[in-house]
Image: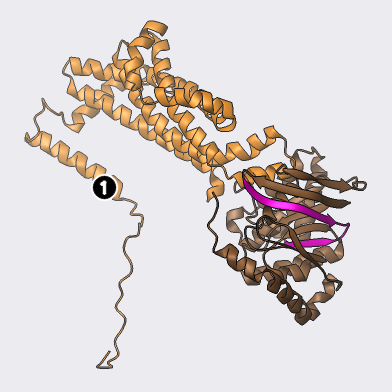
Chain colours: A orange, B brown
Amino acid sequence: MTDGARRAVPFRGGGFRYRPVRAAGWVVFVVVLLLWELGSRTGVISPIALPAPSQAAQALGDLVETGMLWKHLGSSLYRLLGGWLLGTAAGMAVGLTIGLVSLARAGLLPLVSALFPIPKIALLPLFVVWFGIGEGSKLATIAFGTFFPTVIATMGGVDGVDRNLIRMAQSFGLPYRAIVRQVVVPGALPATLSGFRISASIAMVLLVAAEMIGAEYGVGAYILMAGALFAIDQLIAGVFLLSVTGLAVAWLIGRAERRWLDWRG
Amino acid sequence: MQLSIEDLGHRYGALEVLQHIDLTVSEGEIVCVVGPSGCGKSTLLRLAGGLERPTSGRVMLQGAPSSDSLNPLTYVFQDFALLPWRTVAGNVALALEHHHLPAATQEAIIADVLARTKLSEFHDAWPRQLSGGMKQRVAIARALAVRPEVWLMDEPLSALDSQTRDLLLEDLVDLWTRTPFSALYVTHNLAEATRLGHRIVLLSRRPGVVRSVTTIELPLAERERHVPELAAIAQDIWQQMRDQAKAAEREMLHD
């Protein structure tokens, strides 16, 4: 500095930091709905293309009144939960085995890798042939679709467990089963739970697809029927139900993470 | 009980790591193993505790085991090796659970070892809430809980800053002074070795062989007052390994 004048060091840090703005999400929701309603009322949005939110709400109200809501939602939730539980339970067991047993990895991993990328919707007709048009084929599709991502996530979780923790457990003389239960499974749990998020969204996709092929009840069947009848208000109501279901599932997984992964702080 | 390492040799494939190691840890004795990095110090410790199988030679335990030792050869690791999903008490409990002690006995052991390592108030804390020094205290408490015959310590203070290291070193001296224990203590820090070791074994560079053994007669509790003498011993050992440490530092790492 030649002039020797005193001046403050200019501030150039800050920014690039996330801070929570609590109400913003709700405000956006309300604004979008209001604009949509306004557009429909003024005729900017054609009622044939997209009904007003109030009309969709009306259709939802009809569903509640006639009692059909629980019938559709109940069937869907049963398939979603049943298929997902089957698929993830089997997937965790196989993933853990592949992660722990060299022979299982060598034998099963190529098979898993070959089957994983198949869009499971493509197998739906096959499952209809095998398990019938009823609940069997729907449960099988969802179970099969959630199985593979769970295998991959659990296996990755087991691989990621700190080997030094396992060595520590061995050095204290823990039996094999105790090492698996106390070290490997808890260590793989974070990866397994993030696998749940993926498998749950896959389950939703497969649920709707399966319900669009020969189902009397279920949100997917309801949406398909509404589309066929050009009842777009009902269609939107069905989509709304799917969105709420997805949010509920995500919330439940978030709860499970807080419950089981509280040690991460 | 006495731990004897007899003509131990080890190789990873074509890589000869250790050769003809003979070493004895007597009852109540701390043997420090020092050497340039990559001399097989940690491998030696893993072989000594049966975590790895030696290529040649053997490790023997001699003498009647005391009846209340749950895990005669117990490790303390450099990275602490605490389960992050267990609290302080839970981590200590891990070493006890598979012995199926009565619940009250187990609780009493945990309370006792946490008190001895000044951790009582951290009974329910998570590892992530603890500093490095506190984590290593938990690992020491966990080792105390199984009443080892011989401690196998793998650079237990190397991951800590120098202030914490000094504090923990004093704690170890205190623990030993109250109840002498046997230990095979691997370190690269010569100040640590001269402060804790009854004998200091210097290993050469790979393949590791015993180059020299230095015996320090001064009782552990009195060493605090004899820093210059200890520094002279450390300097002497450093002179012996200096060139090798220099060469080791320039070496490419394997795998």
In the rendered image of this protein, does residue B207 appear above or below residue A93?
below
**Quarter-of-image position of residue A183:** top right
Q: How far across and how far down the image is residue A7, in percent?
A: 29, 87
- Work out which residue is located at the far left of the displayed protein and give it: A43
Q: Residue at x 60, y 46 (%)?
A: B85
Q: How far across and how far down the image is residue A222, in percent?
A: 28, 17
- Work out which residue is located at the far front of the displayed protein and give it: B14
Q: Is residue A263 magenta?
A: no
In the image, which residues are magenta?
B14-33
Disc 1: which residue:
A27
**Quarter-of-image position of residue A31:** top left
**Quarter-of-image position of residue B130:** bottom right
Q: Residue at x 76, y 47 (%)?
A: B49
The residue closer to the viewer here, B46 or A190, is B46
The residue closer to the viewer here, B102 or B193, is B193
Q: Is residue B15 magenta?
A: yes
Residue A61 falls left or right of residue A131: left
The residue closer to the viewer here, A158 or B214, is B214
Q: Secondary structure at mark 1?
A: helix
Name the magenta segment's main secondary structure: strand
Q: Residue at x 90, y 45 (%)?
A: B67
In the rendered image of this protein, does residue A156 appear above or below residue B218?
above
Q: How far across and how far down the image is residue B155, in percent?
A: 68, 60
Q: Residues within 10 Å of mark 1 (few under 14, many from 20)?
A: few
